[in-house]
Image (spheres, helix red, strand yellow):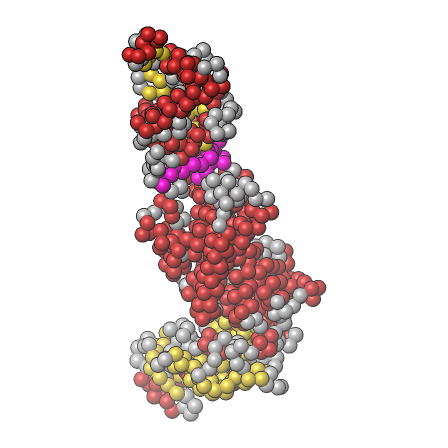
Amino acid sequence: MSALLEVAAVSKSYGALRALESVSFRVDSGDRFGLLGPNGAGKTTLLSILSCLLDPSGGEVRIAGRVVRPGDQAIRRLVGIVPQELAIYDALTARENLTFFGELFGLGGAMLRERVQRLLKAVGLDSRADSRAGIFSGGMKRRLNLAVSLVHGPQLLLLDEPTVGVDPQSRNLIFEEVQRLNREGLTIIYTTHYMEEVEALCNRVGIIDRGKLVACDTLDNLIRRMPGVVRVEVDGSADALIARLREVPGFAVTLADGGLDIAADDPRAALVRVVNLVQETNTPLAHLETREPNLERVFLHLTGRELRD
Amino acid sequence: MKAVWSLCRKELRLLIRDRLAAALLLALPLVFVAVLGLILGESFGQKPDDTLRLSIVDLDGGIGMGGKSWAYWVRQDLLETPGIRLEIVPDRATAERLIRDHRRAAILVLNEDFSRQVNACSFLDTPGSINPFHREGVHLDPKKVNLGLEMLRDPTQRSANAIIEQVVQVCMLRIVLPYMIGQAFQKLSEPRFIDRLGDEVRLPVPASMRLLFGERIKLGEMIRLAAGKDAKQAEKFRESVGDGVQAALRRQFNKYDLTGMTWAALTKAKGDGEQAVMSDFVDREGSGLLRRGAALYQTLVPMYTVLFAFFLVLIVGWVFVGERRQGTLKRYRLAPVTHAQILFGKLLPCYAVSVGQGVLLLILGKLVFGMRWGPESWSMPEQIGWLALVVLTTSFAAMGLAMLVASMARTETQVQLFGGVPVLVLGVLGGCVLPREMMPEQAQSVTLFTPHGWALNAYRELLAATPGYDPNLTIVLQSCGILLCFGVGFLTITWWFLRLD
């Protein structure tokens, strides 16, 4: 795969505030790259730099081999951005919104009309094409917001938390459209603080926190880094059980919230072993569960805090 | 260029679909003009004038003195009277309506026979002669003595019409009396008077001749004796008697020219140079419920056209802030368009709306309020051409300010602060609330620090209340030039301030 986007040691400062610190990663053509981080982590700043809106204080960004500079008009044609805000005109119809933004990119004539119609259909707004956006529901507006970002046919689509305040039906439509576009070859960068969205949509994930990229890998690799956990809660003394568990190679036992967390690479195999040891030590069991490694635990592990802190 | 055109179309759509803005831009100024048109007096917008207005109707078709009608001499006399505004009312019907509507306290009507009747005024008691005098002065009541004139009076304004009547009395005395004296003086050389004098004057006869003529001899007898049988010589002697009497009287009353026929000539007095102002009557009041055609609309319509042209500053500012908040402005930055394209794309439709607003208000001003678009002597294209120049330059200055405010304001509150406050303050200072003519003198010069003041300067010149007014086009061009400078200045600052983030 060739790299469509290369971010090399990008920093951004606002006075004393370091919004981004030496962020580096690459996104290949056809990737669905999730950029995960809590509010204020630097995601929007990074997207602004990627979309030529901001100049980095240090480092370099290349899109399709071309160094990104604010004002570079050719780069702008390669990038589409779905901003957090509903950047559409309420007083214009869905069709007028798409046509207007298409014209800003120099499109026109039958090609633009056809593309607008195709996009309206893709985001499920073809039946409301000539209604003013102002009367649309939040979800419909989000879908129109997405379509507007696609009207000029970008190679790289940046989605900045595109499902905030969206109903499930619209969220699904957005997901479907993003996946469809990706299948057609569009490269996606998707920022969110919803883990499940990244897990559902992205094949590669970057985790950003306090302006630093703390991890960047495929989803599987990131999850694989984390052990599974077996959670045990008992009625009475667990001393004998703890002593036996600590003897098992590959188990890491910690006391937490009145129970035991046993970390192991294979949580299912560990569960069987734990049950056996509970029986052997006659420990009165109150609660038992396995916790598979997931992105949220990866994030917690890497940053030491919950994503929605 | 395509991007600019797209921006323009989009902006126009947004502005047109914003009904509140449309109401603010078109309906509000019309409401203001209509309401103020109903409640303000007819002299609104005119320079306050504390001189006495004397209205006359001149219907005189006769010949009086020097080949001119006596009405002409009345007007001349009044014009030489300081402190008077002489207003010429076109006809009697208008005069009667003005009196009936209590818009004038009194109007002097000089009828068709005025010259004929004045010509008949004489000290002589001959058939057809008129004695114009009574104890108070000159007869102004045609029912008593018809002098060919008449005073129309509003009975509800007694004090005012008493003052006007006194002015007319004095004027008529100055007209009739010198004429009658002059006429009388000329009679001194007429044969009839000399004959009468010859009969009346009896001179003592020297003692040596008393035998022939008695103790006294009539002057006429002496002339006949002196001339013998030569009739021509007798006539010559009579003339020289007349001339002698006249010369003697002239020498006796050498401070006066008794044959002068006019007050100035009679009294040999020279005016102090101050003259009355004469104007044709303009029906400033208008007609109908809306007082269509009232002169005050010549002031009100431009005032509110200019004020609301600058109110577009708020609309444009709100549009910009809305775009900032919604992120659509950010989309421009993501698109391959330059700042200049964005600026023009925003400016041109707003400018078009502003010009449209100005044109519509002036059209409605004409259709609804019956205002004039310029001097009556100008052709319609000429009136439209000059007005268009003022509308275009006013809108340019207004849009320059609008873009400046839009480029600086980040929130609706800032639009109010940067736009609303200056627009109102500039409007008040510029004469959009109180006409410049009604401001104290020191404040009048302040109006010219504002674009509003210059815009109104140009409109005032073109739309003066007097239909026959000849506008000073240099003032119009100068005002338009300064409005252009305001616009360019605002846009230059805008270029530095414009941030799309």
Q: Residue at x 50, y 75 (%)?
A: A53
The residue nearer to you, when weighing B409 against B433, is: B433
Q: Residue at x 33, y 7 (%)?
A: B211
Report the magenta stretch's main SS: loop
* B390 on left or right of A248: right
Q: Looking at the picture, how far across and down is residue B495, in whole percent? A: 47, 69
* Residue A244 sits above or below residue B218 on the image: below
Determine the image quadrant of residue B99.
top left
Q: Looking at the picture, how far across and down is residue A218, in whole percent? A: 53, 83
Q: Residue at x 36, y 41 (%)?
A: B273
* Residue B469 sits above or below residue B233 on the image: below
Q: Residue at x 44, y 43 (%)?
A: B300
* Residue B64 sits above or below residue A192 on the image: above
Residue at the farthest front position: B208
Find out whether residue B292 is within the magenta segment: yes
- Which stretch is magenta? B273-297
The residue nearer to you, when weighing B395 against B88, is: B88
Residue B205 visible within the image: yes
Q: Looking at the picture, how far across and down is residue B101, in whole percent? A: 42, 26
Residue B175 visible within the image: no
The residue nearer to you, when weighing A199 against A239, is: A199
Q: Quadrant of the N terminus of chain A?
A: bottom right
Residue at the farthest left position: B207
